[in-house]
Amino acid sequence: MEKKKLDWANLDFSYHKTDKRFVANYRDGAWDDGELTSDDQVRISECAGVLQYSQSCFEGLKAYTTEKGQIVAFRPDMNGARMENSARRLEMPVFPKAKFVDAVVETIRANASYVPPYGSGATLYVRPYMFASGPVLGVAPSQEYQFRVITSPVGPYFKGGVRSLTLCVSDFDRAAPNGTGHIKAGLNYAMSLHAIVTAHKNGYDENVYLDAATHTDVEETGGANIIFVTKDNKVVTPKSKSILPSVTRLSLLYIAKEYLGLEVEERVVPFSEVKNFVECGVCGTAAVISPVGKIVDHGKEICMANSANGMGPVTQKLYDTLTGIQMGRIEAPKGWIQVIE
């Protein structure tokens, strides 16, 4: 299929409407079959549950053109499973993982001309999401829901390409113990907006959130998980019931152990230990991995010696291996790559 005539190399990370999107509705206790549509407008009740009580969840993944010219998606089944968990926690009807993957594949295929060419540095971002569409006045789950999959060609998440980020320790809490930090609920991100705007005003790229109970342990940033590297090349990532189980992070930990032969630890990381690490990166679907050069704790700077001026040697290997798998240059573990066409 002929590609759209876009300036692929200069795309930013923002919404660019594509031709088709998938829409399914939940009414009378069941999901309909869903369909592709060219209509990009959402029509819901003025008293819809999503508008009154923020009952919504979403996912994010990407489609790529590989070195061989195939269009593929990366581990959509993991996103489908995570959305199932989000729906259960928010008292929303589960959109089954198998149907989720089929909807994602169908939507990408319908927008194949928007999947950036290999080597352009751009990707097709895929956003499945679900929200309460039925009217709700009293505090209760809605009886009607809508599931949609939209796509958008995007460039890098952080402007200016790969550079070392400066993070600040936030005075705000991202998620309460036993709250919703472990699911991809829209309300979690609404709560983070004031914190990230404040960080940007103060000259920082992102926040580091500590655990809400004691404010002593590292959890994650507003939009990504965190990975640290020790002096002896051990990969360490924080563990908490409030951390979102990032598909990218889980994939990177597998790559570190199985592809690169590195020791991996997923454990509680006291903030007091951060000064001992030599590399740091934030990871997620949007950015893959972005290096962190320093973390500022209320004026006190903690510098990462090996990632102060770009990717450190370990995070670079992790990045190169994961993107190599996604782009078809490196053989993928079984089930990681969903071929679209």
Image: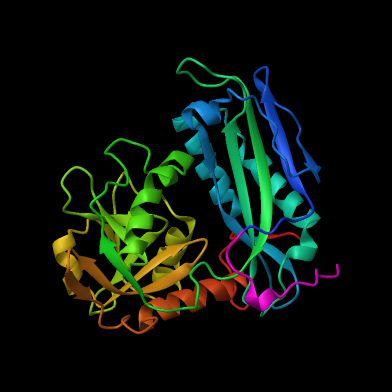
Examine the image and state in which quarter residue 13 appears: bottom right
Left or right of 208, for residue 161 = right
Q: Nearer the viewer, residue 324 or 307?
A: 307
The x, y position of residue 222, in whole percent, is: 38, 54
Q: Nearer the viewer, residue 145 or 139?
A: 139
Observer able to see residue 309: yes
Left or right of 263, for residue 277 = left
Q: Nearer the viewer, residue 201 or 258?
A: 201
Q: Residue sitting at 74 percent across and 51 percent down?
A: 107
* Residue 152 part of the magenta segment: no
Residue farthest top in this picture = 138
Quarter occupied by the N terminus: bottom right
* Residue 2 part of the magenta segment: yes
The x, y position of residue 198, in whole percent, is: 33, 56
Residue farthest front in this picture = 201
Residue 32 drawn above or below residue 217? above
Quarter occupied by the C terminus: bottom right
- Tally the marks: 0
Examine the image and state in which quarter residue 49 appears: top right
| Dominant SS in magenta | loop
Q: Which residues are magenta?
A: 1-14
Q: Nearer the viewer, residue 10 or 93?
A: 10
Q: Residue sitting at 67 percent across and 58 percent down?
A: 152
The x, y position of residue 125, in whole percent, is: 62, 59
Residue 130 drawn above or below residue 26? below
Q: Residue sitting at 17 percent across and 73 percent down?
A: 276
The x, y position of residue 323, in whole percent, is: 55, 73
Observer able to see residue 221: no
Q: Residue sitting at 23 percent across and 44 percent down?
A: 212
Residue farthest right in this picture = 1
